Image (cartoon, rainbow, N blue to C red):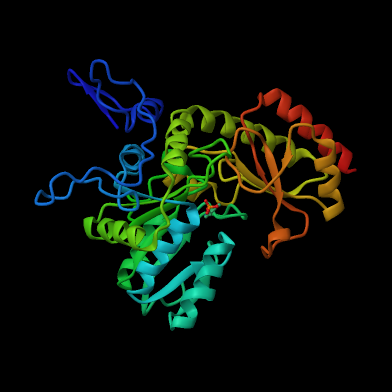
Amino acid sequence: MSVDHDGVVLDGDGTRCVHGGQPDPVTGQPLHAGPVLSAPFHLGPPDEPTPADFYGRSDNPTWRALESAIGELDGGECVLFASGMAAIAAVLRIGAARGGLVLPSDGYYQARALAHAELGPLGVAIREVPTVGEWPTLDGAGLVLAETPSNPGLDVRDIPAAAAAAHAAGALLAVDNTTATPLGQSPLALGADLTVASDTKALAGHGDVLLGHVSTRDPELAAALRAARTRGGAIPGPLETWLAHRGLGTLDLRLARQAANAAALVELLLAHPAATDVRWPGHPSDPAHAVAARQMRRWNGVLRFTLPSVDAVGRFLGASRLTGSATSFGGLQSTADRRERWGDAVAPGLVRYSAGCEDTADLVADVRQALDAVG
Ligand SMILES: *Cc1c(COP(=O)(O)O)cnc(C)c1O
């Protein structure tokens, strides 16, 4: 959102997060609108046109407010879903109707699970490729999904190159932008057809809501996504939507602290003998830094490192006062997730660490003594 006031463009990240999707000022109306919880809406006389809002599975004013805010940040039209997976499911079904699916072998595991369990048996060809490396032949592909930065490896895919490869094969490119958030990366501006995200993570940001969205610049794809949502029924609750909109207001602030904390933790981890395999695209020494710096606007709090064993991760978690043992990421509290437990093909001691909004000095001191306790 850019607030244009007497020719002055006010479009910084914080301004856009705070003002995006907020109602125009009307004297006597609330400064902040509440969630609209009604399932049916008044239809009026039977011979009059159906209003925009008639039933809560099709549309809702609370959705439109957040869709307007996220759409402005993504640079496209946003369609909300009940969760990140509901959004990915809609994207994969649209892709499967056009041809085969090409999925990241090292990305979020439920996207692959959904394709193999529900779309493969219907005859959809599914190929998996790692985030880093050349594409195989994309002939016959209807949709290519890239996840960048990827989870949990935090590898980075060159989005303009991926878009060129997908488009040369006649396929759509969708980018899972969950880790970066719309402030950190603009896949649509880099050539992607669809940007999809789990807003459960940093966008809503407080760990109390599941939500997802897809944005696109193609009006036909946007209409297809809305129709798929209405038919499939994976709709976000208005209360969850309203909570996510409230969370979005502080995304700029939270990302800044999380990225500063991640940068400080990475320095600590790189120098500490207990940790190996430290990855964070924001660090100049990271193998993904050059391509990440070309396409990302700003960094975030998600990093990874490997401890020697499952026991070592247990000692680390037991010794840290600030780090929660939890999956998900992008929340206020720092959390660590040992990814092998979910079936990711990674070392047993690989930890995806989500730097939260604690004070940097406190977090570094706490994590340092937890690493020391690993031995
Ligand atoms: C969490 C996550 C998802 C799934 O989102 P939900 O909101 O949990 O359904 C998809 N992609 C990535 C990269 C994620 O981290």
If the image is split into quadrants, where does the N terminus sit?
A: top left
Q: Quadrant of residue 101?
A: bottom left
Instruction: Say if residue 134 shows up in the picture.
Output: no
Q: Is residue 255 left or right of residue 28?
A: right
Asked if residue 352 lies left or right of residue 67, the reply is right
What residue appears at the point 38 percent right and 73 percent down from the top-left corner?
Answer: 96
Does the image show residue 355? yes
Quadrant containing the C terminus is: top right
Residue farthest right in this picture: 375
Between 162 and 330, the one nearer to me in the picture: 330
Determine the residue positioned at 27% across, 44% down: 41
Q: Is residue 219 left or right of residue 12?
A: left
Position of residue 42 measured from the top left corner of the image (x, y, whole percent): 23, 42
Question: How many marks overall?
Answer: 0
**Residue farthest front in this picture:** 45
Q: Nearer the viewer, residue 249 or 171?
A: 249
The residue that appears at 50% across and 27% down in the rendered structure is 253
Q: Position of residue 359 (x, y in %)?
A: 66, 23
Q: Is residue 63 above or below residue 173?
A: above
Q: Residue at x 35, y 28 (%)?
A: 33
Give residue 185's quadrant in the image. Answer: top left
**Residue furthest left in the image:** 47
